[in-house]
Image (tube, coloured by chain):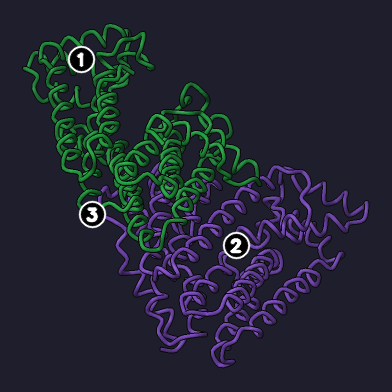
Chain colours: A purple, B green
Amino acid sequence: MTPAEFSPLISAALAKLDYGQSPTELYEPIRYIMGLGGKRIRPLLTLLGAHLFTDDLGPAIKPALATEVFHNFTLLHDDIMDQAPLRRGQPTVHEKWNANVAILSGDVMLVRAYELFFDLSPALLPTVLRRFSQTAAEVCEGQQWDMNFEKDAEVSIPRYLDMIRLKTAVLLGFCLELGARVAGASEEDAEHLRQFGTDIGLAFQLRDDLLDVYGDAATFGKRVGGDIVSDKKTFLLLTAQAQASPSQQLILRQHIGQPVPDAEAKVQAVRAIYDELHIRPQTEALINGYFQDALQHLERVAALPARKEPLRQLALQLMERES
Amino acid sequence: MTPAEFSPLISAALAKLDYGQSPTELYEPIRYIMGLGGKRIRPLLTLLGAHLFTDDLGPAIKPALATEVFHNFTLLHDDIMDQAPLRRGQPTVHEKWNANVAILSGDVMLVRAYELFFDLSPALLPTVLRRFSQTAAEVCEGQQWDMNFEKDAEVSIPRYLDMIRLKTAVLLGFCLELGARVAGASEEDAEHLRQFGTDIGLAFQLRDDLLDVYGDAATFGKRVGGDIVSDKKTFLLLTAQAQASPSQQLILRQHIGQPVPDAEAKVQAVRAIYDELHIRPQTEALINGYFQDALQHLERVAALPARKEPLRQLALQLMERES
């Protein structure tokens, strides 16, 4: 099996999952959110991680699906907390049903994610479950920090980076580590892959911050400047606030956290400050730093270069994506 | 160690649990709800289940705590869904903090409950985790049925009994089965104990329904008649609706599901119908039926009668409780 076949394999395996039937209010929302699609990056990383060390991907498939079910559980509960009306262009579960249904369906999804690990060999199971649980708790910590930051007057850049590490990056790192462990990799290789995935996750999230401001409206899925309009404390804004001159601070304060009479004017004013402060190249430099770190970890993994190539390609795609 | 020492042991072990520190908004609510107390019946059942077969309770302690953390996770999320202002006389987590904090803290509690199983031997871990996950999903199913029943015009008695089995009884059954499995009991003994616990759970919940109407206001913790005032579809109401004469049906319809000008009059009118239909002895007969079934399962467990006695006593206490 070649990496090009992994995505269809994941889609087919996901389509066969049985979450439960009755009551329908509990299980239909799970099928709904899992059916909304997405890139299925997490199970793909798990399979690519396993494929570094083995041709037998069988044992990695259900654990790979676990990461996707878990990820969608976090989306489901986060959407309630963020009062998000849409997810992938469709109504969120709490909008289509209600918040109670969304809470409870999410709870069962977390249980189902755990269940997808239980066929692992008894030798692997405790370590994998410990690492998964630690990662799951960290993702919740990241979401709580993210909510806290909305109210906090001051958020330092290291704390912001730690938030996106917890909320987004550690799960990507876990997916790769998981694949490696299931395929019998050494502790050292599993750890290098975890760090590769975490670095890629940080770069991926920073790319997201960047695309919001500098993305092409035609290819970027969301409205360009949405983070600026909603006063979101992104890496770009926090860096600008840290580096702004007194007159630039004044302009930022006139726009950030203020009612918006003209959203377009706000986006332009803030982006002008970003441009003056060279926020874009600074962000790109940080993204590239994480990317280089990631590649060094991948380099150190004891696997054939040809097997690593799809991971390097995927990382590159995530870095250079325009949407 | 004697069963009288189990409760202090559980309290001490619970007090030592480390759920996490930062962010405080995530972990403080867990310490808060776990600190509200309660009878700690579930870990007690686990230890009593283990004690049937072994004197070495060490390996059962963390799994026993898992059941209590899981139970409190369900309370935390149920309280959001039920918009309950109080839990054990104190503000609920979503009241003291907010719903988002309550959702996310609950999610981490479920993860922490799983973690408390991971020290089990690799030979036991997969089976225990499969059974725990099945039970956890069933508890969620029970909660969803309970919410559905609030809106359903007709709820049959078998469906009501199935709802309380899922929402309350299966977890008590699991706790006993868990203790037995950790202590190396046979599959057959684990199964008898599971059924003993499930029967006791059903009887316990029916006792709750009964106490709401026929409890002594002085000893019953809640307001007597609260279920009647809130039109709750309890075993008593569903049985009365199924057995009422046309004139009694009319009186029930005048009171149930109607705005309440005089709550006391409503309670008295509905209770009068219950009395005419002998709902109390019918309920007591069903409770006693479950209790006898439970004892038969306990009887068949291959353990010393002296070891079973504390379980029989605890079951009797739960049956005869007045609050």
For the residues labelled 1 and 2, the Cα–Cα distance comes to 55 Å
Residue at 39% of width from left, 49% of height from top? Answer: A96
Percent position of residue B39, x then y:
41, 28
Mark 3 or mark 1: which comes first in sequence?
3
Tag in front: 3 or 1: 3
Given the image, what chain letter belongs to the residue carrying mark 2?
A
Residue at 87% of width from left, 51% of height from top? Answer: A249
Question: SS of the residue at dot 2?
Answer: helix
Question: Furthest residue to the left?
Answer: B245
Tag 3: Cα neighbours inside 10 Å, few (<14), some, or many (≥20)? few
Q: On the image, numbered disc 1 is attached to which residue?
A: B254
Given the image, what chain letter belongs to the residue carrying mark 1?
B
For the residues labelled 3 and 2, the Cα–Cα distance comes to 42 Å
Q: Which mark is residue B65?
A: none
Are circles 3 and 2 on residues that touch, CB within 8 Å?
no
Q: On the image, numbered disc 2 is attached to which residue?
A: A168
Q: Amino acid at mark 1?
A: Gln
Question: SS of the residue at dot 3?
Answer: helix
Are circles 3 and 1 on residues that touch, CB within 8 Å?
no
Circle count: 3
Q: On the image, numbered disc 3 is attached to which residue?
A: B187
